[in-house]
Amino acid sequence: MTQPEQLQNYINGAWCSSAAEQYLAVSNPATGEVLARTPLSPSEEVDQAASAAAKAQQEWRRIPATQRIQYLFKLKALMEEHFDGLARCITIENGKVLDDARGEMRRAIENVEVACGIPMMMMGDFSEDVALGIDEYMIRQPVGVVASICPFNFPGMIPFWYLPYAIACGNTIIVKPSERTPLTMQKVFRLLEKVGFPAGVVNLVNGGPETVNAILDHPAISAITFVGSTAVARHVYARASANGKRVQAQGGAKNPLILLPDADIEMTTNIVTDSVYGNAGQRCLAASTIVTVADAGKEFRPALHEAASKRVVGNGLEEGVQMGPVITPQSKTRIQGLIQKGLDEGAKLLLDGRDPIISGYEKGNFLRPTILEDVPVGSTIATTEIFGPVMGIMHVDTVEDAIQLINSGKFGNMACVFTSSGAAARKFRFEAQAGNIGINIGVAAPMAFFPFSGWKESFFGTLHGQGNHAVEFFTQTKVVVERWPKEWSRQF
Ligand code: NAD
């Protein structure tokens, strides 16, 4: 039997084997097949990447932005050419259905396209004659070496919230993919190699928590982006900030969707079930809690039950499948444990998706859609991120109560309302405490030219990923006050 491939790092323009003592098996979550082994790279390899990136940055920042973006145009063309292969790789290592993987790669490419506007996005400001004969201006310069630490659920897209902006602004980068889904970045780095970036501009270091900590402590790295669970986001933010780095750390979520009685039943039911069960609930913008207002529950409960029961579960590569597996057997056990906890706390089981048999995929980490209703306020199941295909239904009497319920939660990634009332929607938009708001939208994912705006415990930092926020994060301002007149002038 052939051994699964041992993945390599890409440092200073070359693929290199890791000297890691530990490797982790990367498995296809639909079949259980071991696809590869990923190194838990030691701190020496982070040091090699950081040193190479620091050296390369000195030259890279001298290349005009108009020329730096030519590399991105080439990258975009290569990503289009390899679009289907990249999407298939996402499905194989992550489990999401092929259409969702395609959507993920589309958003990744969109970020490359937006970053091609960097020459204009990183322009400075100029004021003439701030005093007689004196001019003052502000320019943006790169921060240096940056590192992106990524989660398992969007292995193709999330590095692209950062990489194109970082390098177009004149920084060099180290990407640390999730050790559970490292394969898509292997493919992406083959494309980056083809683009022909100077050695050290883009680097890939595989690994786990120890590799992350080495990144957070490395003195040559100036800025960190992190996306993952709240506990780790908090750790990354605290440790990197204490080391004097700028940090943006996106955390977990528990996203509520409010259904008002005047919402369109058919459209809303389809959108809500897609939001809860898309990517098997493993989206940071997945709906988790459905709050029915007044008598909305009467029609929505049976409609949601019917739509969820019909969801086709299986291998995401197969035509017609609507929901794939969750990422690991441990994740499945954790989700099933949370469902049981919800029942113990008093919720009722409207639809039970535990331990399904998916013919031909007995070794996959499958669950079917689950619905818990009458979820008690403040219970574990009402307040914990499940990150699996579980809908929790709660009920309140008024829009005010619904908004209060949302705002009492600790997360603030996304909140959505379904209604045909403009006034109710406006009130919701104004008062709901979340950074991404959907109005008759179930996954309010910002396009690449808007920031991905988590609030509260869903985000630690000031500037978010994507668009102008990324440009501000990856540049530091320098203000110059300048005098050129021949004679001395003083004015009071
Ligand atoms: P995770 O926190 O387990 O891992 C994320 C990264 O942190 C990985 O690269 C991992 O190697 C590293 N890591 C894990 N434990 C660590 C530790 N103790 N010390 C240092 N580094 C550590 O997250 P995940 O399970 O891969 O991803 C799912 C989570 O990500 C969910 O909570 C989801 O909501 C969140 N997420 C958030 C957003 C957002 O935009 N807010 C987007 C996608 C995913």
Image (cartoon, grey):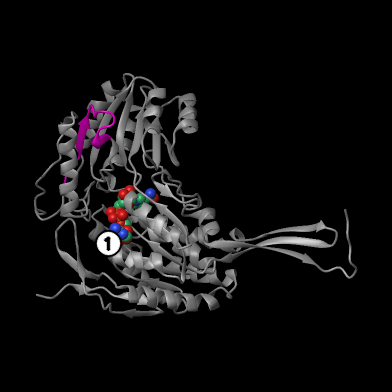
Q: Position of residue 285 (x, y in %)?
A: 35, 44
Point out the image quarter for the N terminus: bottom left
Residue matched to label 1: 181
Residue at (16% x, 65% y) in the render = 34
Q: Is residue 371 magenta?
A: yes
Q: Position of residue 118 (x, y in %)?
A: 56, 62
Q: Is residue 474 above or below residue 393?
A: below
- 78 or 253: nearer the eye? 253
Lateral position of residue 363 relative to residue 152, left or right: left
Q: How many marks?
A: 1
Image quarter for residue 339? top left
Query: Callout 1: few (<14), some (14-19), or many (20+) C-alpha neighbours within 10 Å?
Result: many
Residue at (31% x, 36% y) in the render = 272
The residue type indicated by label 1 comes to Thr
Residue 368 visible in the displayed image: no
Residue at (26% x, 21% y) in the render = 298
Q: Is residue 301 above or below residue 52?
A: above
Q: Position of residue 327 (x, y in %)?
A: 22, 54
Lateral position of residue 281 relative to residue 446, left or right: left
Q: Which residues are magenta?
A: 367-382
Image quarter for residue 159? bottom left
State which image quarter holds ligand 1.
bottom left
Q: Is residue 79 above or below residue 289?
A: below
Q: Residue furthest front?
A: 242
Residue 68 visible in the displayed image: yes
Residue at (19% x, 55% y) in the render = 328
- 44 or 407: nearer the eye? 44
Q: Is residue 326 above or below residue 109?
A: above
- 443 or 480: nearer the eye? 480
Image quarter for residue 354? top left
Q: Is residue 332 magenta?
A: no
